[in-house]
Image: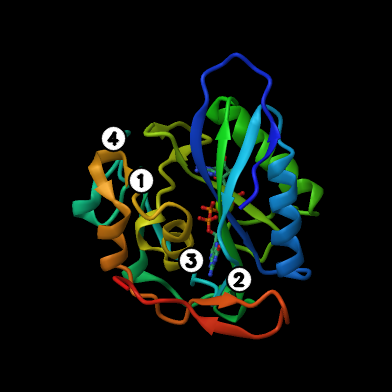
Amino acid sequence: MSLSGNHNSNAASTMTYIGIGSNLNQPIQQVLTALKSLAKLPNSRLLAQSSLYRSHALKVPKVADTGSAEPNPIDTGLIGTRAIESDQAIESPAAAQNDYINAVAKLETRLPAEQLLLALQAIEQSHGRIRKQRWEPRPLDLDILLYGDQTIATDTLNVPHPEISKRHFVLYPLAEIAPELIMPYDISLADLLKRCPIDELAIVELASETTSNTAPSAGE
Ligand code: A4P
Ligand code: MG
């Protein structure tokens, strides 16, 4: 899709992928507006955006701190720095949440990762996001999925995003805009897709904004 944004710094640029999610206050409009905001980020260029996808809200998982600053490779089912035991997912109010609308954007940026995170949080706030607890319904959530080939593990930032390898609503939109993607630890997106069923994930038909079709299955 169209390229846009501002590019006026001398710093090196990095290819980054942003996960966009909403399940509150007209989620489709929230995601579309967020894409416009991403296109206006300073020292950045929006290179591509996926279709919008609808899926059920995940249940709140138990979080297990790995106790290690070292990211977990794909052999553990993760490529992030914080293990989420999705097989131990517990019933919670999240089970009754509205469906999510998700998309992924490809952004070339000269912003350092921490500055990018702050800029994304400012966009979330401009969409009325108020943080009370994790995984609550939200008008807008912006996650840094990948930041070049870097792995980052700080108090405020974990990249690659810890749950990227398990989430159909991240992997399938990512495959639309970067099918050949190779992630840190030489993990290919194609391999992750083979391990991630598409389940009920569906592309949103924007013409009607109410109907949806099933997205192509893995390997197609
Ligand atoms: N943080 C660390 N790493 C990152 C990163 N790579 N990108 C920190 C963005 N933020 C990162 O995030 C909590 C803190 O994570 C931030 O202060 C930041 O410093 P948050 O947005 O306040 O809280 P959250 O989103 O509730 O928690 P979390 O762990 O980010 O959850 P997720 O992964 O965003 O999952 N179901 C469907 N179908 N679709 C969804 O999009 N999303 C969630 C939330 C749950 N269920 C979902 C979906
Ligand atoms: Mg988040």
| Distance from mark 4 CB to nearest ligand 1 atom below 8 Å | no
Q: How many marks?
A: 4
Mark 3 Cα-neighbour bin, 10 Å: few <14, some 14–19, many ≥20: many
Q: Amino acid at mark 3?
A: Phe
Q: In 3D space, how far apart are the residues under numbered discs 4 and 1 (Cα atoms)?
A: 9 Å
| Residue 124 picture location, percent across and down | 72, 49
Mark 1 and mark 2: Cα distance apart in space: 22 Å
Residue that badge 1 annotates: 80
Q: Secondary structure at mark 3?
A: helix
Q: Earlier in the sequence, mark 2 or mark 4?
A: 4
For disc 2, the marked residue is: 100
* Disc 4, SS: loop
Residues at circles 2 and 4 in contact by the CB criterion of under 8 Å: no
Q: Secondary structure at mark 2?
A: strand
At a point 68% along the width and 44% down the height, the residue shown is 38
**Considering the image in quadrants, where does the C terminus appear?**
bottom left
Confirm or reject: label 3 Cβ below 8 Å from ligand 1: yes
Query: What residue would you read off at disc 4?
Result: 70
Is label 1's Cβ within 8 Å of ligand 1? Answer: no
Q: Quadrant of residue 111?
A: top right
Mark nearer the N terminus (1 vs 2) = 1
